[in-house]
Image (cartoon, rainbow, N blue to C red):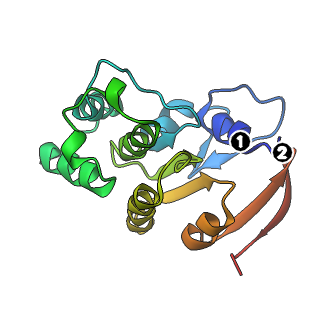
Amino acid sequence: GAGKSTLINSICGLVNRNYGNAKVFEFDINHNLRKIRKRLGVVSQFDVLWDELTGIEHMQLFQLLKRVEIKNFEALVERRLGDVGLRDSGNLMVGKYSGGMRRRISVALSTMGNPNVILMDEPTTGMDPVSRRHVWSLIQKLKDDTAIIMTTHAMEEAEILSDKLIVLDHGMLKCAGTPL
């Protein structure tokens, strides 16, 4: 009821807004969604995966959808799978993945196309502590070149990963500042 997922879905253009506006870089979400989506990666609250495709096939599909050419794509796939602890599971159909594995491949998929902004809606939900640390390490690495907006219920996660925290209540900003 805080409005976290609604905010993420509004920025992506997945839900219609009643009022308000936002900009992603210089692009207005009311008029430039196509341009925004080219520069945006998303980990939605519910995984958008096809059981019949492997993790690697998902990465290929998402890269094609982004229409961004990457040299050494195979090396990027190997690196991202390793980043989220799925190197040995890339050729396995996603339908055989556990819930935590599905979340991890979703995080890896959000990086396809080298987005400038990644929206992550509770990316570590359902993960064991070791898997969560893999994802936290990737997020820390991505923060150097990518703006990451992440929702979470876990204050430990927010404090470790965030440069700035925002508290929402029923869609209203209640507090903003550093983790301290």
Above or below for 104 versus 12: below
Among the 4 quarters of the image, the one containing residue 139: bottom left
Could you say which disc has been placed on residue 102 in the image? none
Q: Position of residue 138 (x, y in %)?
A: 38, 61
Q: Residue at x 30, y 17 (%)?
A: 52
The reply, left or right, for residue 37 in relation to residue 166 is left
Q: Which residue is mark 2?
A: 171
| Image quadrant where residue 15 sits | top right
Q: Callout 2 environment at 10 Å: few (<14), some (14 to 19), or many (20+)?
A: some
Q: Nearer the viewer, residue 56 or 178?
A: 56
> Image point 57% across, 50% down: which residue?
26
Spot occupied by residue 76 in the image (x, y as percentages of width and height): 20, 50
Q: Nearer the viewer, residue 79 or 101?
A: 101
Q: Position of residue 33 (x, y in %)?
A: 56, 32
> Could you tell whether 26 is left or right of 71 in the image?
right
Answer few, some or many: residues within 10 Å of disc 1's Cα (few below 14, many 20 plus, some between 14 and 19). some
Q: How many marks?
A: 2
How far apart marks 2 and 1 lie (CA) works out to 8 Å
Above or below — where is 111 with respect to 60? below
Reading the image, the residue beneath label 1 is 7
Whether residue 29 is visible to the viewer of this picture, yes or no, is no
Q: Amino acid at mark 1?
A: Leu
Element at label 1: helix
Q: Residue at x 41, y 55 (%)?
A: 131
- In which quadrant is the N terminus drawn? top right
Callout 2 secondary element = loop
